[in-house]
Image (spheres, rainbow, N blue to C red):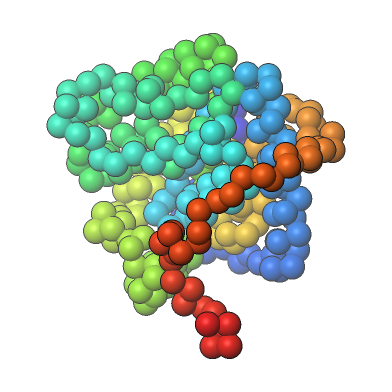
């Protein structure tokens, strides 16, 4: 099971304010660069060894899941590291076995899949907002541990992260998004509605942990009131959870280019994008 200190801390953190000393930008950028270089080594090992890695990111709205996923993926090979962020199910998908739409996105050999929310929607937003019945919710809690054990037995490395954010910090981030037109798109009507159901989400999360925080597939709780610290800690835990070796140390040699005897068409036969940033003297 996940360390009980983590569980208690998360329960307090989700319902009571925390005083977090935020990490400096200088330290953050230095550590992020180092960890991203390690992620590149990990991805090459996953590709070479044919590993299958599935990572779930869950938590309250504005907890920082998307920012962590972005930092994990931004220096990675998109053919190896794939992000899955599913929209609401289609009419057809609502008639399928609940886990069916997620199974098709699980990693093949040599892939790392990052789920920006996952099958745990049924234990969270669907439960709280009434998008599933009590029977469907109970069936999910019964079958989810078995489903995850099947995934693990198939050879997939499964990691689950819960981003824990305090009430006060979530409100601050929501307000920041409301005030900033460039961030307003991040707030959906469902996100805003979630603020009115803070206690309901706490109750649903605790019930979810009680049945799905298993020895085979534990939840890793990330204290996310400081986004920078949360990203670094999450990435480090991923690196610690998947053994790998450095396959990137060999220096590459740039081959000589072939002799250029080809006469290319005149430049004025091509349509160029306007250079809107050239200095007047350069135009």
Q: As drawn, is 85 to the left or to the right of 247?
A: left
Residue 257 vertical position relative to residue 276 in the rendered view, above or below: above
Whether residue 81 can be seen here:
yes
Task: Using the image as rendered, state which of residue 135 and residue 162 is in the foreground.
Answer: 162
| Residue 261 x/y as whole percent | 67, 44
Residue 131 vertical position relative to residue 53 in the rendered view, above or below: below
Whether residue 219 can be seen here:
no
| Residue 211 x/y as whole percent | 44, 27
Label total for image:
0
| Residue 118 x/y as whole percent | 40, 35
Q: As drawn, is 71 to the left or to the right of 275?
A: right
What's the residue at 49%, 50% (across, down)?
Answer: 65
Task: Using the image as rendered, state which of residue 211 and residue 48 is in the foreground.
Answer: 48
Snapshot quadrant of residue 88: top left
Q: Spot the residue most to the left.
A: 91
What's the residue at 65%, 37% (across, down)?
Answer: 238
Residue 214 vertical position relative to residue 8 in the rendered view, above or below: above
Task: Using the image as rendered, state which of residue 50 and residue 217 is in the foreground.
Answer: 50
Q: As drawn, is 60 to the left or to the right of 139?
A: right
Q: As drawn, is 97 to the left or to the right of 177?
A: left
Snapshot quadrant of residue 207: top left
| Residue 268 x/y as whole percent | 46, 64
Name the quarter where the N terminus is drawn. Answer: top right
What's the residue at 70%, 27% (across, down)?
Answer: 45
What's the residue at 53%, 82% (across, down)?
Answer: 283
Q: Spot the residue most to the bottom.
A: 280
Residue 252 vertical position relative to residue 231 in the rendered view, above or below: above
């Amino acid at each position: 099971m996940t360390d009980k200190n983590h569980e208690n801390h998360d329960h307090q953190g989700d319902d009571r304010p925390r005083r977090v000393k935020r990490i400096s930008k200088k330290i953050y950028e230095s550590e992020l660069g180092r960890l991203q270089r390690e992620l590149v080594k990990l991805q090459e090992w996953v590709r070479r060894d044919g590993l299958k890695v599935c990572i779930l990111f869950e938590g309250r709205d504005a907890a920082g899941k998307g920012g962590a996923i972005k930092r994990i993926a931004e220096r990675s090979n998109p053919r190896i590291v794939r992000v899955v962020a599913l929209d609401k199910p289609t009419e057809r998908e609502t008639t399928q076995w609940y886990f069916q739409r997620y199974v098709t996105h699980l990693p093949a050999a040599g892939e790392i899949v990052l789920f920006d929310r996952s099958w745990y929607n049924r234990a969270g937003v669907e439960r709280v907002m009434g998008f599933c019945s009590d029977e469907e919710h109970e069936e999910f809690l019964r079958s989810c541990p078995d489903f995850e054990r099947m995934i693990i037995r198939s050879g997939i490395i499964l990691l689950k992260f819960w981003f824990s954010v305090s009430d006060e910090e979530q409100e601050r981030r929501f307000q920041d998004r409301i005030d900033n037109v460039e961030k307003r798109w991040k707030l959906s009507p469902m996100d805003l509605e979630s603020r009115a159901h803070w206690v309901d989400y706490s109750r649903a999360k605790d019930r979810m942990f009680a049945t799905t925080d298993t020895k085979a597939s534990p939840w890793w709780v990330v204290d996310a009131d400081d986004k920078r610290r949360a990203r670094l800690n999450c990435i480090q835990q991923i690196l610690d959870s998947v053994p790998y070796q450095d396959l990137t140390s060999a220096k590459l040699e740039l081959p000589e280019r072939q002799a250029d005897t080809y006469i290319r068409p005149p430049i004025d036969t091509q349509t160029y994008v306007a250079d809107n940033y050239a200095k007047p003297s350069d135009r």
